[in-house]
Amino acid sequence: MLRVCAKRVAIAALMMAGADIASAHDGPPYPIVSDRAVGAYVISVWTDPDTTDDGSPGGQFWVMVDPRNEAAPLPADTRAQVSIAPLDRAGQAQSGWSEPVRGDVSRQFVALVMDHEGRFNVRVALDGPLGPAEVEADVEATYDLRPPPILLALYVVPFLLVGFLWLKLLLRRRRAEAPAAAATSEAEEQPGAGVGPRDH
């Protein structure tokens, strides 16, 4: 139970660290395998399955591995091979070996190319001194619908310009009102201002 809680607390840090490895981190990752005990391991797999047209590896996978025996450390040379294959059409399977995230062998990352939208089978095969293990799941690859950063900047520019012009107009109006306010204040402070000669 303690291991599960610690793993969930570490997920946010893992996603941020994975973003440093990937060239872009699009959309929130989600689990496709959660704390599954297989062989000598407890395995979780998170993914962000983005489709790309330019050949860039948009399908991102985080593999979290812990030894089933909590008293035994996870060997440093434990690695996971992640393979994907389309389920909705004929296509060649792709695979890649994950790498530790910031040197943590229990948290590994790999990115693969998903060249079309649709369902993919994901197979994660572990290999290491504790023996082999394998888990499978299916994911739905989709295009990332959020605009690229350059378009977001273009969208924001008009609002920034409007805000700048409004602030400039406000400052100009305040500067114009300041002399009039100062003159009124001086007139009110002059002794006898506005009072005619008194009759004796």
Image (cartoon, rainbow, N blue to C red):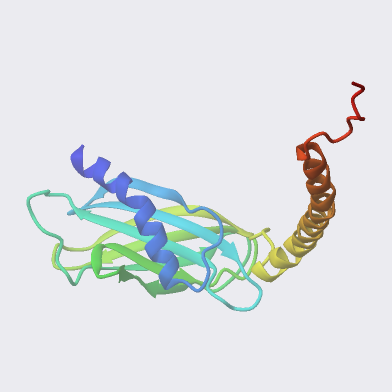
Quarter location, residue 165: bottom right
Judge by depth and name the residue closer to the eye, 13 or 132: 13
Name of the residue lying farthest toward the bottom: 55
| Residue at x 32%, y 65% (from the top left corner) | 108
In the rendering, at what x and y percent does residue 10 appear?
Answer: 31, 51
Judge by depth and name the residue closer to the eye, 153 or 177: 177
| Residue at x 75%, y 38% (from the top left corner) | 189
Q: Is residue 118 left or right of residue 21?
A: right
| Residue at x 45%, y 60% (from the top left corner) | 122
Quarter location, residue 157: bottom right
In the rendering, at what x and y percent does residue 54 appear?
Answer: 64, 78
In the rendering, at what x and y percent does residue 127 appear?
Answer: 23, 67
Q: Is residue 43 left or right of residue 182?
A: left
Residue 70 vertical position relative to residue 81 in the rendered view, above or below: above
Name of the residue lying farthest toward the top: 200
In the rendering, at what x and y percent does residue 17 appear?
Answer: 37, 64
Q: Is residue 96 left or right of residue 148?
A: left
Mark yes or no: residue 25 visible: yes
Dividing the image into 4 quarters, which one contains the C terminus? top right
Judge by depth and name the residue closer to the eye, 34 or 188: 188
Dividing the image into 4 quarters, which one contains the N terminus? top left
Name of the residue lying farthest toward the left: 71
Quarter location, residue 167: bottom right
Judge by depth and name the residue closer to the eye, 67 or 108: 108
Mark yes or no: residue 123 visible: no
Q: Is residue 150 left or right of residue 130?
A: right
User: How many marks on residues?
Assistant: 0
